[in-house]
Image (tube, rainbow, N blue to C red):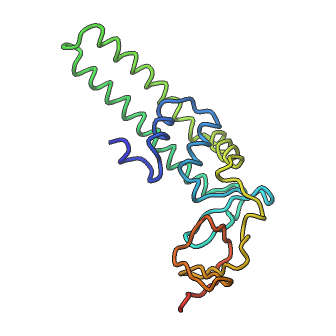
Amino acid sequence: DIKKNAPVHLSEKNIFKLLHSDFTDFNTAEVFVDTYGQFIKFNHNTGCWFLWQGTHWQEVPDKSSRLLYEKWFSISRWAIIQAKFNYHLLKEQLQQNKRIWGKDKIEEVQEKLKMLYKIVKSTITLESHHKLKNTIEVASGLHQVSSFDKDFNSDIFKFNTKNAVFSLNKGTCNHEHNPDDLITLLANVNYNP
């Protein structure tokens, strides 16, 4: 099952896009953002990426964004393996059934093999340094991950602790950390009512 072996957040739409479309920088950036967008933000004021840590957002320390590259590699590596698997499976089926399939069926399968071979060759380019850099660069401009300094820590009444977010003006506590709060600050204490 293709979906079962895909990276955790890879949707059916993105699986199809990876295995059946052109690998333009925009297409690959869309797949990357659709897959990891809820866990990454790009701050246009600082030119830095932020990653969701489960309790708060943290700036990626280097401009090379190694952690983002690792996330992209999990997608690209899967796509390469899946494309090769699909190609070899169909090739094996052709070999096993050549004697029983008719000429039309054999020609149809051979055409599919040519298409799959092109996909295999294309997926290999997903791991090139150039593709990787362009994917991350184009992704930084997509609205799902775009942010600015003003977006982070905008609710001055939210106090973020290791186990909860306390609202100072409402006197309420939320035990679920929410990436939508865009909080980068974390007090090194546990909230204890």
Q: Is residue 186 above or below residue 137?
A: below
Q: Is residue 16 left or right of residue 153?
A: left
Residue 129's spot in the image, x, y percent? 64, 42
Residue appearing at x 45%, y 25% in the figure: 117
Residue appearing at x 55%, y 87% in the figure: 190
Q: Is residue 73 left or right of residue 51?
A: left
174 and 169: which one is in front?
Answer: 169
36 and 167: which one is in front?
Answer: 167
Residue 104's spot in the image, x, y percent? 30, 8
Considering every residue shown, the one lying at the far right of the view is 45
94 and 177: which one is in front?
Answer: 177
96 and 175: which one is in front?
Answer: 175
Residue appearing at x 29%, y 13% in the figure: 105
Q: Is residue 137 above or below residue 104?
A: below
Q: Is residue 33 left or right of residue 98?
A: right
Q: Is residue 134 left or right of residue 47?
A: left
The N terminus, quarter of image: top left
Q: Is residue 175 above or below residue 92?
A: below
Residue 106's spot in the image, x, y percent? 30, 13
Residue 98's spot in the image, x, y percent? 24, 15
Residue appearing at x 68%, y 41% in the figure: 134
Considering every residue shown, the one lying at the far front of the view is 170
Residue 165 appears in which quarter of the rendering?
bottom right
Considering every residue shown, the one lying at the far top of the view is 103
Considering every residue shown, the one lying at the far left of the view is 100
